Image: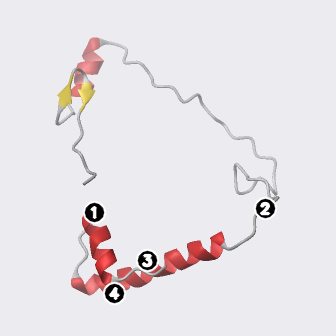
């Protein structure tokens, strides 16, 4: 798969990245090299290979230090109101974000 200038400009618009005409050729070439590398990696047969949780796991005994993935409750109403003051938009104590999908 190769990216042409039209695809790159559409991708830049959707991701809200400004690409100048001078940067267009270099960015297109970089992106096409990245996509080529991904295609090369996808062509490798990985059947029967166990996934690793850490890249050095095959060479060392790695014990990952994991914490529970839990939301920490706000301790006080004052802390919550201080946090919500940072929100540009909010409703019923929730942060509101703009829609980005067209």
Q: For marks 1 and 4, give the CA distance.
A: 19 Å
Residue 67 image offset from top left, x and y in percent: 60, 31
Q: Gap in Å between the C-alphas at discs 3 and 1?
A: 16 Å
Point 33% across, 76% down: residue:
7
Location of mark 1 (residue): 14
Residue of label 4: 25
Question: Which residue is located at x 25 percent, y 86 percent?
Answer: 22
Label 3 close to label 1 by CB (< 8 Å): no
Disc 1 element: helix
Q: Earlier in the sequence, mark 3 or mark 1?
A: 1
- Circles 2 and 1: CB atoms closer than 8 Å: no
Camera-side mark, 3 or 1: 1
Q: Which residue shows up at 74% across the image and 41% down it?
A: 63
* Label 3 element class: helix
Q: Label for residue 74? A: none
Image coordinates for residue 73, horizontal then vertical, percent: 41, 18
Residue 63 drawn above or below residue 60: above
Res 56 → quadrant: bottom right
Camera-near label (1 vs 4) is 1
Q: CA distance from mark 2 to mark 4?
A: 37 Å
Q: Residue at x 28, y 52 (%)?
A: 101
- Labels 2 and 1: the sequence-earlier one: 1
Query: Pointer 3: what residue?
Result: 31
Distance from Cα at disc 4 to Cα at disc 3: 10 Å
Q: Residue tagged by mark 2?
A: 47
**N-term mark: 4 or 3:** 4
């Amino acid at each position: 798969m190769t990216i042409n200038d039209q695809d790159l400009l559409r991708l830049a618009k959707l991701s809200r990245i400004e690409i100048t005409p001078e940067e267009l050729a270099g960015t297109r070439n970089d992106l096409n090299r990245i996509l080529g590398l991904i295609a090369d990696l996808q062509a490798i047969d990985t059947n029967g290979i166990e996934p690793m949780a850490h890249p050095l796991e095959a060479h060392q005994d790695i014990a990952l230090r994991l914490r529970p993935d839990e939301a920490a409750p706000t301790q006080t109403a004052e802390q919550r109101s201080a946090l919500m003051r940072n929100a540009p938009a909010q409703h019923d104590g929730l942060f509101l974000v703009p829609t980005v999908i067209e």
